[in-house]
Image: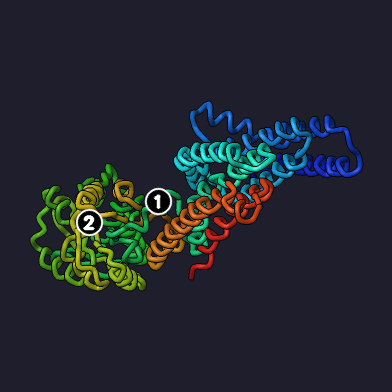
């Protein structure tokens, strides 16, 4: 928790104690106003000094903050009290009320690491404060002048009350809190569904997504493939094919590598140690086994290794049409076999695609697999657009092309070899990306979008409410009802109204917690 929280509590308690003492003195003793003046000044310095310090620091940085309004209000009230020998108690009460509001704000944030969420509450309100605070000061001054010119006696009293009430009631606290409180509440709601929003600012982008790119492996599929068939050229033992493949894949953590190693282990094959291994991401691996060159990979990789695949090319096409992945294996520059791997499709993949389509969001599957395999998988989950045969580094380029067409792109991946694509995307769904789905449920992609939309709507409601509050509060504090009722808003009530406006924003933001 911010250490200022405990400091504020101490400052408020001290102010309350001195305030009660002054109240006792005022009601039992008289003619000791100099004691009240000194005591109130002590409260002003100790319990309210932070308002003046923060206001001065902001002005030095050519900025405005709510502390400036509060400092002017309580400073003016104290000076008036010294000259008129009254209203000391009001100065202390206003300091107590405003400090209580700050304590409530810090209490709200006490269990939230704003730094980790990339939320800067001060910066979020700088633009708003830059416009509102000078305007409020100007309105307060003009109002005081009007009271001086046409107000009833005592003119100085009515000038002070209206001036202070406007400064206090029109503090932009609610406007400054409108956006960060909604974001924090939205992130908290997402976390309840095991959705981690790692970049708070991205929450306002998620609701604008109109294109979702789904990586095939470990996103649409489970990412747990198994070897389902081994096709060999005449005269080659299937175990030899599997053994060479396992030797080359040893040390890799790619799902296909793990599947091949698991198959070799299940068959109890002896796996030789490959030397001089070279791994070409999304293409294949080559190395030396028992003194002979060997390689494993896709069609393009085999062609680059000068290995002829004609004998098994048709088999590979037939397998691909069923949605399985085929990997060629060669030894000593000669094709020896073809591994077929099946990666089961996630049960919620088709539901996700349908929900995204219902939301008018374009869905594209991207994969390094060949076109036939990709189209077969896409058809099973209802995807009509496929980008296949792409290298990992090419995925980012494909996303950039879509963005040039005004697409707001979300990239969903397990993160393996897709770092550049996740960075290029407007929103990345993966471990250590913008959004992390802890339980890997694709349903949570849709829920993330729903939460984002609800959060942005909540921000708008907060901002609208805060604006309406100021539009109503300022004329009321200026005394617009005085000619009809003879009543003028007490500055202490203005301070309470300021806190209540902030509290209303917080309560409204927390409505997000009750989303289904």
Return the residue found at the far top.
60
Q: Above or below — where is 266 with respect to 100?
A: below
Q: Residues within 10 Å of mark 2 (few under 14, many from 20)?
A: many
| Residue beneath the point at 57% across and 60% down | 507
Q: Closer to the camera, 408 or 144? A: 144
Q: Closer to the camera, 428 or 329? A: 428
Q: How many marks?
A: 2
**How is the rendered protein coloured?**
rainbow
Q: Nearer the viewer, mark 1 or mark 2?
A: 1
Residue 383 pos. (x, y %): 23, 68
Between marks 1 and 2, how big is the CA–CA gap?
A: 28 Å
The residue beneath circle 2 is 368
The residue beneath circle 1 is 202
Residue 1 pos. (x, y %): 64, 45
Return the residue found at the far right.
28
| Residue beneath the point at 39% across and 68% down | 443
Q: Above or below — where is 356 with respect to 494?
A: below
Return the residue found at the far left.
310
Q: Closer to the camera, 146 or 226? A: 146
């Amino acid at each position: 928790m911010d250490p200022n929280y405990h400091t504020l509590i101490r400052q408020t308690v001290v102010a309350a104690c001195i305030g009660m003492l002054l109240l006792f003195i005022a009601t039992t003793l008289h003619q000791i106003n100099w004691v009240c003046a000194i005591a109130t000044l002590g409260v002003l310095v100790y319990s309210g000094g932070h308002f003046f310090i923060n206001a001065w620091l902001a002005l030095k940085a050519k900025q405005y903050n709510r502390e400036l309004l509060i400092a002017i209000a309580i400073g003016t009230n104290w000076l008036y009290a010294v000259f008129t020998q009254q209203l000391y108690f009001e100065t202390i009460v206003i300091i107590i009320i405003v400090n209580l509001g700050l304590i409530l704000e810090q209490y709200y944030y006490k269990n939230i690491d704003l730094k980790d969420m990339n939320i800067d509450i001060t910066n979020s309100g700088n633009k708003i404060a830059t416009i509102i605070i000078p305007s409020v000061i100007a309105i307060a001054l003009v109002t005081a002048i009007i009271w001086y010119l046409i107000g009833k006696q005592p003119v100085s009293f009515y000038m002070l009350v209206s001036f202070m009430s406007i400064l206090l009631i029109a503090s932009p606290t609610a406007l400054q809190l409108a956006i960060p409180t909604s974001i924090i509440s939205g992130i908290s709601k997402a976390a309840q569904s095991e959705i981690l929003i790692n970049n708070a600012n991205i929450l306002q982008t998620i609701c604008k997504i109109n294109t979702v790119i789904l990586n095939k492996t470990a996103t649409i599929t489970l990412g747990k493939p198994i070897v389902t068939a081994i096709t060999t050229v005449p005269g080659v033992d299937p175990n030899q094919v599997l053994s060479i493949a396992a030797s080359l894949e040893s040390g890799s953590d790619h799902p296909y590598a793990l599947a091949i190693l698991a198959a070799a282990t299940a068959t109890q094959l002896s796996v030789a140690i490959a030397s001089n291994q070279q791994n070409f991401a999304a293409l294949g691996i080559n190395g030396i086994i028992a003194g002979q060159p060997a390689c494993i990979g896709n069609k393009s990789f085999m062609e680059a290794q000068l290995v002829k695949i004609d004998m098994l090319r048709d088999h590979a096409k037939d397998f691909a049409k069923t949605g399985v992945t085929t990997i060629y294996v060669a030894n000593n520059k000669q094709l020896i076999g073809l591994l077929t791997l099946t990666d089961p499709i996630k049960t919620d993949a088709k539901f996700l695609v349908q929900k995204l389509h219902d939301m008018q969001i374009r869905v594209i599957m991207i994969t390094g697999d060949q076109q036939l395999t990709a189209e077969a998988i896409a058809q099973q989950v209802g995807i009509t657009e496929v980008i296949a045969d792409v290298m990992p580094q090419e995925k980012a380029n494909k996303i950039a092309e879509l963005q040039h067409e005004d697409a707001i792109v979300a990239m969903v991946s397990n993160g393996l070899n897709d770092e550049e694509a996740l960075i290029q995307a407007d929103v990345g769904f993966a471990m250590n990306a913008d959004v992390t789905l802890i339980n890997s449920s694709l349903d949570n992609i849709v829920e993330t979008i729903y939460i984002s939309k609800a959060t942005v709507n909540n921000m708008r409601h907060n901002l609208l409410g805060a604006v309406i509050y100021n539009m109503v509060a300022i004329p009321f504090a200026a005394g617009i009802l005085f000619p009809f009722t003879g009543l003028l808003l007490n500055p202490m009530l203005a301070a309470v109204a300021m806190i209540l406006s902030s509290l209303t924003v917080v309560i409204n933001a927390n409505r997000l917690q009750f989303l289904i």
